[in-house]
């Protein structure tokens, strides 16, 4: 078996040596043509910026408390949020408008599928997590200056873009809370009006008023003061008529005051979130123009083209050799 393999290998070497001139010519020609072709390929340059996500909303929490660890790095959740923002189409559209990338890429907006071509060009922007939990923003472009400018612009725009999204949501919460506060205030006005009407009827603080009237009633009875008993009895009847309503209104007013306090506390928090402009990233490394191109790799293109040409030519010659060898036998059999 080993002898057979050695024989086959030796046969391949002999075959290659036999056809060495065509193989060499085609291989060299393919390599030269590939090298010449690579000279016409537009070179691409690459720049990278690296950021870390902070722990979002670590400055403001409920109950008017503040954390001091505003420098804490975010976890996987915060990193994934930043990745989602950086990869969003709206975020990339901001770059398109900022740098007029339609003209930079030479895209004809009259073409039917110009948007598809635009976003295909934007595929040269890659955003991925690093092994240490950071985010690498890598931009490839025909201009090293533009590649660095785009990467840095994405870093710079991140704060404004994320803060705008969060402020829109916080403002919506502020509006909702303010409407609820207005509703509570309107209810308090109604309750206060009802309490004032009861006060006009002589009903003030129900519990204390009942205790006072009952003491006066007992005293009048003990003294045999019939006129006083009759007067106090009318007051007792009045309390019995309006007293339960007074208790209900008092409890409702206490509830509304507590609710108003809670809503104002939440509104204060929401207003703080709507007005604060906290940085949305830690910049570890800004992009700089790199003059060394990343593509095309002329040596790799030339090498692989030459190897491919050699292999294809080798098999074509092998097929031709087999045909020449078997053709006389085939004709003889006929």
Image: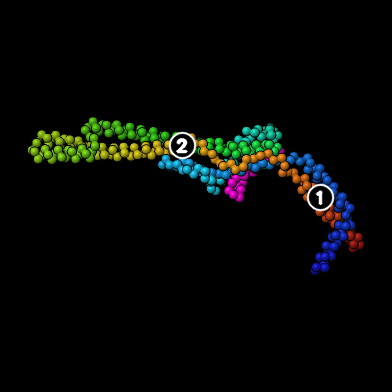
Q: Magenta stretch: give its range.
A: 125-142
Q: Nearer the viewer, residue 115 or 66?
A: 66
Foreground tag (1 vs 2): 2
Q: Position of residue 245 (x, y in %)?
A: 26, 38
How far is disc 1 from disc 2 in space, using C-alphas? 66 Å
Residue drawn at point x = 80 percent, y = 45 percent: 34
Q: Position of residue 172 (x, y in %)?
A: 47, 36
Q: Is residue 119 left or right of residue 309?
A: left
N-terminal of the pair, mark 1 or mark 2, is 2
For the question of whether residue 321 can be seen, the reply is: no
Residue drawn at point x = 42 percent, y = 34 percent: 178
**Image quarter for residue 10?**
bottom right
The answer to whether 105 is drawn above or below residue 133 in the figure is above
Quarter in which the C terminus is drawn: bottom right
Quarter in which the N terminus is drawn: bottom right
What color scheme is it? rainbow
Q: What secondary structure is the stretch in magenta mostly built from?
A: strand
Q: Is residue 296 magenta?
A: no
Q: Which mark is residue 306?
A: 1
For the question of whether residue 262 can be seen, the reply is: yes
The answer to whether 320 is drawn above or below residue 225 in the figure is below
Q: Nearer the viewer, residue 106 or 297?
A: 297
Q: SS class of the residue under badge 1?
A: helix
Pointer 2: what residue? Answer: 272
Q: Which mark is residue 12?
A: none
Q: Is residue 245 left or right of residue 217?
A: right
Residue drawn at point x = 50 percent, y = 42 percent: 70
């Amino acid at each position: 078996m080993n002898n057979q393999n050695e024989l086959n290998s030796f046969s391949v070497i002999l075959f290659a040596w036999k056809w060495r001139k065509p193989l060499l010519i085609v291989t060299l020609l393919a390599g030269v043509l590939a090298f010449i072709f690579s000279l016409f390929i537009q070179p691409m340059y690459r720049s990278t910026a690296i950021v870390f996500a902070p722990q979002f909303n670590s400055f403001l929490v409920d109950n008017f408390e503040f954390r001091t660890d505003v420098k804490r790095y975010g976890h996987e959740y915060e990193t994934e949020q930043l990745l989602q923002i950086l990869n969003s189409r709206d975020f990339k559209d901001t770059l398109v408008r900022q740098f007029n990338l339609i003209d930079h890429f030479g895209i004809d907006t009259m073409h039917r599928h110009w948007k598809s071509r635009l976003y295909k060009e934007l595929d040269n922007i890659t955003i991925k997590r690093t092994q240490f939990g950071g985010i690498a923003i890598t931009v490839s472009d025909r201009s090293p200056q533009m590649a660095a400018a785009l990467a840095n612009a994405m870093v710079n725009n991140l704060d404004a873009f994320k803060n705008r999204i969060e402020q829109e949501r916080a403002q919506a919460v502020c509006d909702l809370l303010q409407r609820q506060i207005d509703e509570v205030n309107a209810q308090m006005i109604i309750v206060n009006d009802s309490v004032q009407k009861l006060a006009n009827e002589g009903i003030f603080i129900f519990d204390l008023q009942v205790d006072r009237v009952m003491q006066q009633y007992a005293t009048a009875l003990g003294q045999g003061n019939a006129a006083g008993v009759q007067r106090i009895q009318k007051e007792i009847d009045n309390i019995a008529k309006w007293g339960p309503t007074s208790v209900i209104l008092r409890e409702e007013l206490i509830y509304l005051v507590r609710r108003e306090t809670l809503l104002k506390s939440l509104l204060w928090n929401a207003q703080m979130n709507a007005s604060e402009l906290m940085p949305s990233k830690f910049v570890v490394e800004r992009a700089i123009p790199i003059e060394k191109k990343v593509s095309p790799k002329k040596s790799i293109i030339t090498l692989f083209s030459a190897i491919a040409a050699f292999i294809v030519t080798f098999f074509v010659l092998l097929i031709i050799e087999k045909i020449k060898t078997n053709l006389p036998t085939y004709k003889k059999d006929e």
